[in-house]
Amino acid sequence: MISTFNPFETHYDSINDKDDFNIGNSNKNHTVNPLETEAERNIRTRTVTPIVTGSSVAAFVFNGGVILAADVLGSYGSLAKYRNLPRIHQVNDRTILALGGDLSDADYIKEAIDAKVEEDLVQEDGSEMTPLALYSWCTRLMYHRRTKLNPFLTSVIVAGIENNEPFLGRVNDKGSAYKEFLIMTGIANHLAQGWIRTILENSNQLNKEQAEHLMDRIIKQLFYRDCRAFARYRVCIVTKEGVEFKAKEVQPDWSLAPGLHNTE
Amino acid sequence: MSSIGSGYDLSASQFSPDGRVFQVEYANKAVEASGTVVALRCKDGVAFAIEKIVTSRLYESGSNKRIHNVDKHIGMAVAGLLADARQLLTVARDEAKQYKYDYGVSIPVKYLADRLAMYMHAYTLYGFVRPFGCFILLAAYESDGPQLYGVEPSGVTYGYYGIAVGKAQQTAKTEIEKLKLSELKLEDAVKEAAKIIYQVHDEVKDRMFELELSWVGQVNDGKHERVPTNIFNDAEKFAKASLEEADDDDDEM
């Protein structure tokens, strides 16, 4: 909604001084109606802190496709409350959406996209949502909410096959978006991205088995070090042939714990 | 057609002395002037067949389809003014989308028919709008079986086992009544519907027509779609063959 502020008109503070006949307010010229911006109008209802959150999402491109992994936990602060919430969603045969951060906002985004895909389906013109289209749409959505100071407190990862090439991109809650061969959100950004990038940059493209093996290593490391991680997780592999989901569980080896003095 | 209404037909907000709303009746005339639509609700599904009259060879085939998807599971067939129907299609799609958003499940076709009927009826109440000149048929295959509903320009809606609307509706209706719909399977219903279209098509008045066939039923898991190419070809062959049979019978006599 466009602001209706007119500096040449007399104004009054509409909360405190209700002057129905607009009679004597000469010392209140050029004041601004305090509820004029949308950010002020929904100051009580806009999203401030996330409530139920998903932890990190890890994703990278390998030779022939993209692999993503995210655990199935919804944390309620530090409580591991919802232990079966998959965070990787299939949009269509070649597009995947993974979400981290506030999960109610994540659900909103997922439902909006599902409705959009169904709407497009009934047009019967064979056109499908591509990863790049979804990535652009999510960027617009997140940036729009950021501009209204009412952000979706989630990170959105879009992955898939675009024009026969693997696609991987991320949009954060500020609407800042980028495409890369390696994307980590949440605390994985700090714990895992550094050493994974070194491995991926120095190797020739990995094949599918190597990619899966590397992803298992990443998730295991995150499970050791992330306080909000969970042992059960889902892996999603997108290739030209299609989309594959796998449910896995981390098999941690805690025997090394006594040797690490900083765990006491 | 000149002085039927004579003064009481100027707007939909007027009754005639004998209690008719002429604008709505004129809307029905627009429906009767369009290409025939035949819909058959059989044992395990619903089949639509439409005689889409083509007025020029210069038109790209497949333009201006008269069968649409409202939601994945609901099909809409249109008789009457296509442009009016396009608006109703948008309305129906919005209703279905909103219902899904509110309740999490696909809209039952009965509710969609009711809502569409309420919408169409609203346009028959005021003098500054005209009623919709189209008859909408809605079909779905739901948990309690196949469903077929029709909404008239006046806003009344009925559930049907079989219906024909358009130019040749009387002839087609007689043909439909000959079928035992409750025992027919969907693949056969599609063929029978195509056959009826070919039979009632008037070669003299409308030379070219395109047949549109669609189905929804147990066979495609309740997803409304145009009939697959092989079934379409079979149905057309069946329809043309039965036409020739009828011609042969006439020749013999």
Image (cartoon, coloured by chain):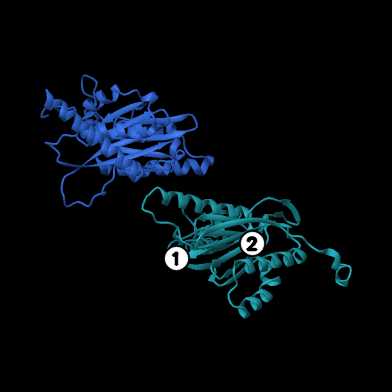
Chain colours: A cyan, B blue
Badge count: 2
Marks 2 and 1, how far apart in space?
A: 54 Å
Disc nearest the viewer among 2 and 1 = 2
Residue B53 point in image, percent of width and height: 20, 41
For disc 1, the marked residue is A7
For the residue pair A214 and A90, the one nearer the viewer reads as A214
Q: Which of the chains bears the disc numbered 1?
A: A
Q: Which residue lies furthest to the bottom in this view?
A: A202
Q: In this view, does B135 lie to the left or right of A197?
A: left
Q: What's the mark number on residue A69?
A: 2
Neighbours of disc 1 within 10 Å: few (<14), some (14-19), many (20+): few
Q: In this view, does B222 lie to the left or right of A44?
A: left
Would residue B79 be visible to someone looking at this image? no
Q: Residue furthest top?
A: B18
Quadrant occupied by the C terminus of chain B: top left
The image quadrant that residue B48 belongs to is top left
Residue B183 point in image, percent of width and height: 39, 24
Q: What residue is rendered at 15% in x and 48% in y? A: B56
The residue type indicated by label 1 comes to Pro
Residue A166 point in image, percent of width and height: 51, 68
Q: Is residue A71 left or right of residue B105?
A: right
